[in-house]
Amino acid sequence: MPGGAHLKAHPRRLVPALGLSLLLLGAAACSPGPVGIAVPTPAPEVASACASLINALPERITEGERRETDPVSPLTRAYGDPPIELTCGVAPPAGMAEAASQCFEVNGVGWYAQEAENGVIFTTIGRKLYLEMAVPNAYSPEANVLTDVAPAIKSQNPVITPCT
């Protein structure tokens, strides 16, 4: 066409395209967004080791796929809906000093468990880094999800004191 191309929408093609666009928009609106996770501020050497640990975690935990976190941080990771939240470089939780008797092991990794309002917060125990894993009640029994992260923890977070 002289003077540039002019496009005219064909009515029969516009309706399916519009329907598909609305369907895709609806699917995007229903998918879970980023998970808000507080980012700790550990010492630089801990942050570096934590970033390696977080990178070694699997792409899925149970049926939950990896999700974006807000803010984006190499110290956090989230999976599934409701989200399972992992944070590396946290301070030891209150009560952990007495945790030797409360330590339990899953696939060679020692954990300290604290009941929370909507689930359980697990923290690695007896290792160089403290990794916290908040698991909602929807994944009951909550301790089952710990098996999926054990290989990464064992390879990236050395044992200092074994769980007994």
Image: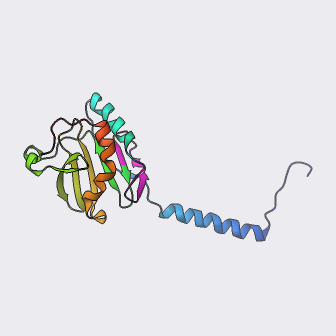
At x 63%, y 63%, the residue is 21
32 horizontally vs 10: left or right: left
Residue 93: image x %, image y %? 16, 46
At x 21%, y 37%, the residue is 159
Res. 38 in view: no
> Can residue 46 be found in the magenta stretch?
no
> Can residue 64 be found in the magenta stretch?
yes
Coloring scheme used: rainbow
Above or below for 102 versus 63: above
Q: Nearer the viewer, residue 123 or 3?
A: 123
Residue span colored magenta: 59-77
How many marks the image carries: the answer is: 0
- Residue lying farthest to the top in this orientation: 45
Residue 90: image x %, image y %? 23, 41
93 horizontally vs 157: left or right: left
Residue 154: image x %, image y %? 28, 40
Q: Nearer the viewer, residue 161 or 1?
A: 161
Res. 98 in view: yes
Residue 72: image x %, image y %? 40, 43
- Kindly indicate the quadrant of the structure image that contains residue 126: top left
At x 67%, y 66%, the residue is 18
At x 43%, y 49%, the residue is 59
119 horizontally vs 63: left or right: left
